Amino acid sequence: MQRSSGESKLVISEVMMPSQANVAGNIHGGEIIKLMDSTAYAAARRYARSNVVTARVDELEFHLPIFIGDLVICSAQVVYVGKSSMEVAVTVEVEDLEYEGRKKALSAFFTMVSLDKKGRPNVVPALLLDTPEEKLAFEEGQKRYELYKAKKVQKRKG
């Protein structure tokens, strides 16, 4: 079974509220990470059609601060698929609703694992790659996956 890249994309938006900020009006990083995780979860669950859990977050990078009243647009796309795991690229854009334009605020890669009804790893469909960009993202995801696995083996030996 295979799924197209269209089944692997998802966008969630939310206006940031005072309860999500510190006293200076900056949104807590944890609030944004939670939104990113929820978006990665929904994209991976839609793709796998099963329960999924977060196994790892890689390369989380904050580019800009986010403030009360900003619109946060969180986009996720499955970019790499292994046997039971998926790498989901998540990008957060921020828009000050008083002005036009969006800016990239955060990005990260989430590794999500598909689970069956008994909580065991579940095989996920292969990812159909239609564009050169999708193929490149898949190859880069595969490299990150292999690097992570090699580090894991090194930890066991060391």
Image (spheres, grey):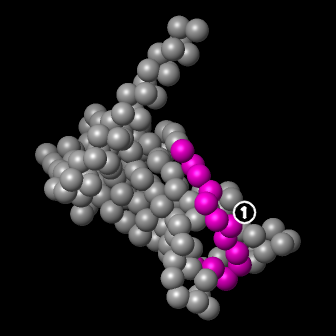
> In the rendered image, which quarter contains the C terminus?
top right
- From the viewer's perspective, is 130 left or right of 112? left
Q: Residue 50, image x and y in percent?
A: 33, 50
Q: 121 or 71, which lies in front?
A: 71
Q: Residue furthest top?
A: 157
Q: Residue 118, image x and y in percent?
A: 38, 37
Q: 121 or 65, which lies in front?
A: 65
Visible residue check, residue 77? yes
Q: Which residue is mark 1?
A: 28
User: Of the residues shown, which amino acid type is indicated by label 1?
Assistant: His
- From the viewer's perspective, is 57 left or right of 112? right
**Magenta stretch, residue numbers:** 59-72
Residue that appears at 51% across and 51% down: 108
- From the viewer's perspective, is 75 left or right of 65? left
Q: Residue furthest left?
A: 1
- From the viewer's perspective, is 89 left or right of 142? right
Q: 107 or 40, which lies in front?
A: 107
Is 135 located above or below residue 20 in the figure?
above
Q: 103 or 23, which lies in front?
A: 103
Q: Secondary structure at mark 1?
A: loop
- For label 1, the crowd category at 10 Å Cα-Cα, with few meaning under 14, some 14 to 19 and many 20 or more, is some
Residue that appears at 46% across and 29% down: 148
Residue that appears at 67% across and 57% down: 30
- Report which quarter residue 145 is drawn in: top left
Q: Residue furthest bottom?
A: 98
